[in-house]
Image: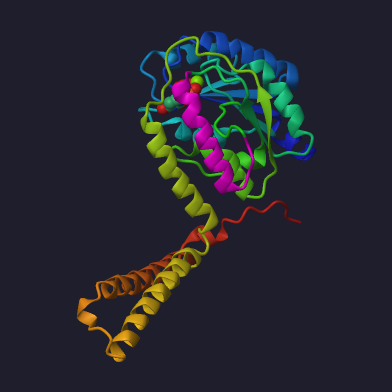
Amino acid sequence: MEEHRAQSGCQLSIVVPLYNEAESLPELIPRLEAVAEQWTGGTYEIWLIDDGSTDGSFEVIRQFHRRNSRIRGIRFRRNYGKSAALAVGFAEAQGQYVVTIDADLQDEPEEIPRLLAKLSEGYDLVSGWKKHRRDPLSKTLPSRLFNAVVSAVSGLRLHDFNCGLKAYRREVVKAVQIYGEMHRYIPALAHWEGFRVTELPVRHHPRKYGRSKFGASRFVKGFLDLLTVLFTTRFLRRPLHLFGSLGVLFAIVGFLIDAYLVIEWAQQRTALSNRPLLFFGLGLIIVGGQLISLGLLGELIVKSSLWQSSYNIAERL
Ligand code: UDP
Ligand code: MG
């Protein structure tokens, strides 16, 4: 670990995804600078990823970069979403440790050292927990439901998956792949990759400038992405286990139903033609067969693709 630090010469990378936050930046950047300077003694970088702002955010970043070359900027030509901004920041990050923070000052830059201290207790990812959340009820209520569902399906018990403030060891940001709206699941993704994940309560403030960048569509997209996340992490390498077991289950139930009808028919109690259940059983058998084939197709795709080699290796000698 120490070797790596010497190699890259950068201890801390702060990654800030931002979309139309020109008003917050002049307050945010100096506070980040001060925290990073104090924690590293000067070996840090701050990556401001401008996700296609139209309010002159990047001009503000350019000004700060002129003054301090450790403040770096990337500007997307159009708005791709927070996950895209984070993914690009993660790819650029050189630091031993990586911290993400929203640009809107809802989280305090001054909390960063506490998160980093928690990492050194032996964690790979420390996620902020907005324990006293300063957002309208229309946001906090669905978010509680969201966190409960993700906790349940991911097996990782966290109160708050989607806090903008998080600290990572470098390996984590290089291992997780995020796109779509998947930034909400980073702790779950890291957990599935075998990293140690925990959370730490952080202070939270109402938005000072501008407005939230996410509308109601966040819920639909968020839950669809949960499906993708579940599917691509749990069943990525064994699609037949998912589709095959469902298919076999369907087919067996269908077969039992029809077998029962046939026995009754053989005993000449009823005619098959007036048993609607027959079609239900048939349907189950057919769909079951389809699901098994779908699983086999999945297996073929996995076998012929690169996915196989994407195991998260912790060490190599
Ligand atoms: N953001 C972004 N691209 C987007 C939407 C948001 O980079 O398309 C940034 C935004 O500027 C902020 C962070 O992601 O720094 C969180 O967004 P916001 O504060 O609007 O989300 P909320 O706090 O309402 O969940
Ligand atoms: Mg916010």
- Residue 12 is covered by the magenta coloring: no
Visible residue check, residue 74 = no
Visible residue check, residue 297 = yes
Q: Nearer the viewer, residue 74 or 271?
A: 271
Residue at 55%, 38% (x, y): give it.
Answer: 148
Relative horizontal placement of residue 208, taking residue 11 as reference (left or right) = left
Residue at 22%, 84% (x, y): give it.
Answer: 271
Residue at 43%, 38% (x, y): give it.
Answer: 222
Residue at 61%, 49% (x, y): give it.
Answer: 192
The dominant secondary structure in magenta is helix
Q: Is residue 261 placed above or below 148 in the rendered structure? A: below
- Residue 147 location, quadrant: top right
- Residue 92 location, quadrant: top right
User: Which residue is outermost to the front?
Assistant: 269
Q: Residue 42: x percent and y percent?
A: 71, 19
Q: Looking at the figure, which quarter contains the C terminus?
A: bottom right
Start and end of the magenta stretch?
136-158
Q: Residue 118: x percent and y percent?
A: 75, 30
Q: Residue 289: x percent and y percent?
A: 36, 73
User: Which residue is outermost to the bottom?
Assistant: 267
- Residue 144 is covered by the magenta coloring: yes
Q: Is residue 311 placed above or below 301 in the rendered structure? A: above
Q: Looking at the figure, which quarter contains the N terminus?
A: top right
Here the colouring is rainbow
Relative horizontal placement of residue 264, taking residue 61 as reference (left or right) = left
User: Which residue is outermost to the left?
Assistant: 273
Relative horizontal placement of residue 194, taking residue 223 as reference (left or right) = right
Q: Residue 160: x percent and y percent?
A: 59, 32
- Residue 292 location, quadrant: bottom left
